[in-house]
Each structure stands twice: as structure tokens, then as C-alpha cells.
Amino acid sequence: MVSLTKKMLAEFLGTFMLVFFGAGAAAITLMISAGQATTTEFNIGIGILGGLGDWLAIGLAFGFAITASIYAFGRVSGAHINPAVTIALWAIKKFPSRDVIPYILAQLAGAGVASFLFAASVGMDAVTIGGLGATAPFPGIGYLQAILVESIGTFLLMIAIMGVAIDRKATPGFAGLIIGLTVAGIITTIGNITGASINPARTFGPYLGVFVLGGENLWELFPIYIIGPIVGAVLAAALYIYMSTETAT
């Protein structure tokens, strides 16, 4: 029986990996783009890919980090590394109530520490230019639109999680790979709409780091990345249970 303390440590480390490498990739992408010459000469770097190319690179960074976290910590804590996932599993009675708050606190702490250590590793440009990879709706995207997009993205993620990790009939061994690829695809698609958080902790860490280190105050946007992911994850989990429950004939 794994103790709650060990499970919390696993959630801390898993979310740390997610934010340090995933959000860190977003910050580095912005820094590379900002450092490129404005002339037409050819430059080599992630920023030169532009548009979906950048989001694919960022999405893969998140996907690889999530895949590694699931295979490293899945047997310890289940590797939720996302408060929306924890809440959704609790809502369908697949996770004990007593562990919900400790898991979420560990996830938020891992995200926060990752952002501060990324800033310490890279320097203040990571904050002032890269925003520590913080998420925000892009120009022309309204508050409710952003919540809707985050709900849809997290819905798709949670459906995948239910199918490959929670369902007892799932083929063993593939959960980490499939979930990581799903996240990469979602981020590639919706990254240029909301920043593609699909995880309240992923947004919390950079917001905290940017705020404390003297960057922009983004907290008014945080409800987007709480409401959207939680609503999407809970709906997906409930729908999957409904679809997969066998009925008597």
C-alpha cells in the first residue's frame, strides 16, 4: 500500500516535469522568436517554424513530459498531474474524497516550483519575454469562448484517459504513449486560441511565477483555466461511464 505522502510526491514530481519542460518549451519558443532578425535572411530555430509548427513543437514537449511522468509515476499515484483529472475521477467515484485536496495541492506546488526553477535556470527573459509559458486567450477570443475551447480540449483528453487508463478492458502498457500523443494533438490545434492549458495546475505555475517575479498580472484570466478543464473532464468521465456500462437485456 503506497502512502499518501509518496503519492503526493509523485504528483508533485509529475506536474513539475509537465510544467518545466512543457511550459518551458513555450517560453523558449517566444524567446527564440523575439531574438530573430526582422529581415528576410534565413534563421534556424524553433521560432522559424511559425504557426502550427511552433505549436507542434510545444505540444510534443508537453506530450513527451506527460508520457514520461505516466510511466515513471503511474504505479505510485496514478499520475493524474492535473487537478481536472483528479476532480473528474472523484466525481465518478473512481478516486477517494480524502485524497482530492492533497493531490491538488501537490500538483499546484509542483507547477509553481517548476516555474520558479525554470526562471532561475534561464534568467529574467523567461519571465519578461517568455512569460514562463503562461496561457492566455489570443486576440479576438472572448472569455466564454476560451472557457468553451478549454472544455472541449480537456473533454477529449479525459475521454482518452478513461479509454486507455481507467477502463479495466484497456490494453495495458499504452496509456502513457496515447495520453501524451493526445495532449500533443490538442495543444497543436487549440494552442493559438487559448494557449491550450487543459490543466489548471499547468496555468497556475507560470501565473504564480510571473506575478511574483515582476511580470504581468494574469490572475483575472485564471477562472478560464479552472472552469473549462474541470467542466470538460467531468463531462467526459461521466459520458464514458455511461457509454461503457453494460445494460441487462
Image (tube, rainbow, N blue to C red):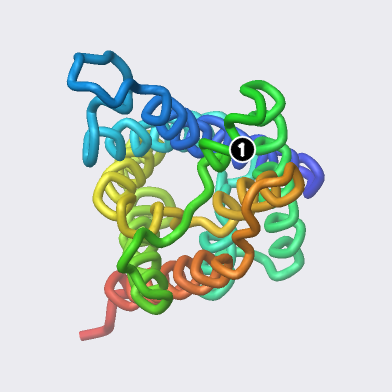
Q: Is residue 49 above or below residue 66?
A: above
Badge 1: few (under 14), some or many (20 or more) residues near its Cα, within 10 Å?
A: many
What residue lies at 32% left-to-right and 31% top-to-bottom?
Answer: 57
Query: Where is the N terminus found, in terms of image quarters?
Result: top right
| 190 or 72, nearer to the observer | 190
Residue pictured at 66% horizontal, 36% vertical: 114
Q: Is residue 146 visible?
A: yes
Where is residue 29, by image quadrant?
top left
Taking the spot 39% from the left edge, 36% from the top edge, the residue there is 63
Percent of width and height locating residue 43: 26, 15
In the rendered image, residue 194, in percent from the top left (x then y), is placed at 38, 59
215 sits to left or right of 139: right
Please provide percent x and percent y for residue 11. Answer: 66, 44
- Dividing the picture into quadrants, the one containing residue 123 is top right
Left or right side of 230 for 49 = left
The residue under label 1 is which amino acid type? Val
* Residue sitting farthest toward the front: 39
Circle 1 SS class: helix
In the picture provided, is 98 more to the left or to the right than 59? right
Q: Where is the C terminus found, in terms of image quarters? A: bottom left
The residue to which callout 1 is attached is 127
